[in-house]
Amino acid sequence: MTTGNFWDTEVWSFIITVTMLLGAMMVANMLRRSIKPLRKMLIPSSVLGGFLLLIVNFIYKQIFNGESMFSAQMMEVITYHGLGLGFVAMSLRRVEKNSDQRLKSFDTGVAVVGGYLIQAVVGLVLSTALFYIMQKGFAASGLLLPMGYGQGPGQAYNWGRTYENLWGFDNGTSFGLTVAAMGFVAASVGGVIYLNLLRRKGRFSGSLGAEVTEAEDSKEAVTAKGEIPLSESLDKLTVQVALVFIGYIMAYLIMIGFNALINTGILGDFGVNTVQPLVWGFNFLFGTLCALVLKGILGFCRKKNIIHREYTSNFMQSRIAGFMFDIMVVASIAAIDLSAFTHAEFIVPLLCICIAGAVATYFYLAKLCPIVYPDYSDEAFLSLYGMLTGTASTGVILLREKDPRFETPAANNLVYQQPWAIAFGFPMLLMLGFAPKGTVQLFATIGLCALLFVAMLIILLRKKIFRKKK
């Protein structure tokens, strides 16, 4: 029995919100295509759309006495689930790797974790110093730098909200989302600077923000050999979406299991304050693992002739992931609470952390890429810098300026590095719930992150170190 009418606002609120998000992206894309300087800045349409919606909503609030155009809670939910669903779709794609690709995937995963760690060290050192100088703020807020820059808006929201609810970080959610938004700006600025340096050195002759042709953009076939047909009794897109949601619900059931264990009290305060936020904050990680399991089950059934065709489509899963990430980005930026900027203890750490994080990431990769990727160091830098300040799609946008047809392995490295990044980055994830507990834990986290960063460098520079010893 229904509790309302079809003409009630609540019935249409989700549709209205999604339409606003998509409409903002469409307007942003038209502006980006028609305004040449804006196109040259290499800002993704989803990011620009988020800022447009943020500004329009701010003006709307001034006119209508603080009333918002949309529910901030709904925006946060879209951000949270968009991240998880996007990662499931990416993980369901079929990949083929050779030995060289496996090695470079390993190195890229380690390099990505190294980027997280240097961002964590820089962010924590600055936030701790500013906390003691200003006697205000939240000392562990620097850990939101690798979450916002390295992991993107979804994780910035997850951990900003966790720090706000569990550890009393006022405006923590807005802080985290603002770091993520600034990350996209840092990606665009750093990418443009690097491409102009390459132009001066004669290693880049393209036009910034040039339109990609259809031939360059058609990296994957719509229907590959052996896949299910486009339209049968069940539409092919319906099957792809169903697989994504099945994988995500598998992750939800696992997280519910962890929650049941925590609620027994067997893990004490550690379970409530550390394990529970980690489990629910890393929904994308569980989604990735469950997607791999689901893909393995489908592969096993194919080998045993239980099913006779490939049910996953690389082309469609890439499009689903792209949609999820785009809508996640625009929703996360639109959800930023601008009222938080009226507090000085919010603005100063934010500016210092974001600027220092961008500079540290830039120089870390500028020194590392020529050593680890000697054959395509420029392409590797652009893809990794874009990803470590924005998202994987930002890395692809920067890479496309130098390598429009993806002829180097840089694009594949972004996809295949994920399991290694999860494996090597797991110790750092545990520190997210450890650092806010006290001064000792805070400084211990800085020291541990620094040691882990050195370990990542040793792994990446192993060949160079070995040659010197020899």
Image (cartoon, helix red, strand yellow):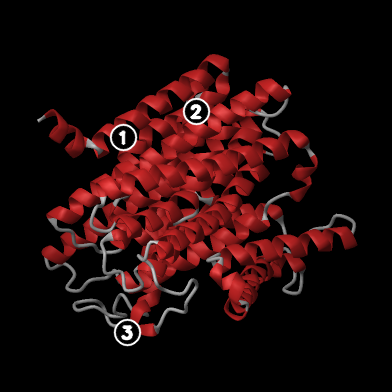
Q: Is residue 243 above or below residue 156?
A: below
Mark 2 crowdedness (10 Å alpha carbons): few <14, some 14-19, many ≥20? some
| Position of residue 57 measured from the top left corner of the image (x, y, whole percent) | 76, 62
Q: Residue at x 25, y 51 (%)?
A: 105
In the image shown, does 246 or 25 lie closer to the viewer? 25
Q: Mark 1 near mark 3, Cβ–Cβ under 8 Å?
A: no
Q: Is residue 159 left or right of residue 349?
A: left
Q: In the displayed structure, does residue 39 sit left or right of residue 67?
A: left
Report if the CB atoms under discs 3 and 2 are less than 8 Å apart: no
**What SS does tag 1 mark?**
helix
Distance between the alpha carbons at the discs numbered 3 and 2: 47 Å
Quarter of the rendering containing residue 408: bottom left
Q: Which residue is mark 3?
A: 232
Place of residue 466 in the rendered image (x, y in percent of width and height, measured from the top left): 15, 33
Q: Residues within 10 Å of mark 3 (few under 14, many from 20)?
A: few
Can residue 108 be seen in this snapshot? yes
Identify which residue is drawn at 67% across, 66% down.
Answer: 17
- The residue where tag 2 is placed is 274
Please give the label number shown on residue 456.
1
Residue 392, above or below 309:
above
Q: Element at badge 3?
A: loop
Which label sits in the foreground, 1 or 3?
A: 1
Question: Which mark is first along the chain, 3 or 1?
Answer: 3
In this view, the residue in front, 172 or 233, is: 172
Q: Which quadrant of the rendered structure holds the N terminus?
A: bottom right
Q: Are marks 2 and 1 in contact (CB under 8 Å)?
A: no
Q: Is residue 453 above or below residue 38?
A: above
Residue 68 place in picture, x, y as percent: 79, 58
Tell me which label, 2 or 1, sits earlier in the chain.
Answer: 2
Look at discs 2 and 1 and give the one toward the viewer: 1
Decide which of 415, 263 is in the foreground and name it: 415
Give the amino acid type for the residue marked by disc 3 in the picture.
Glu
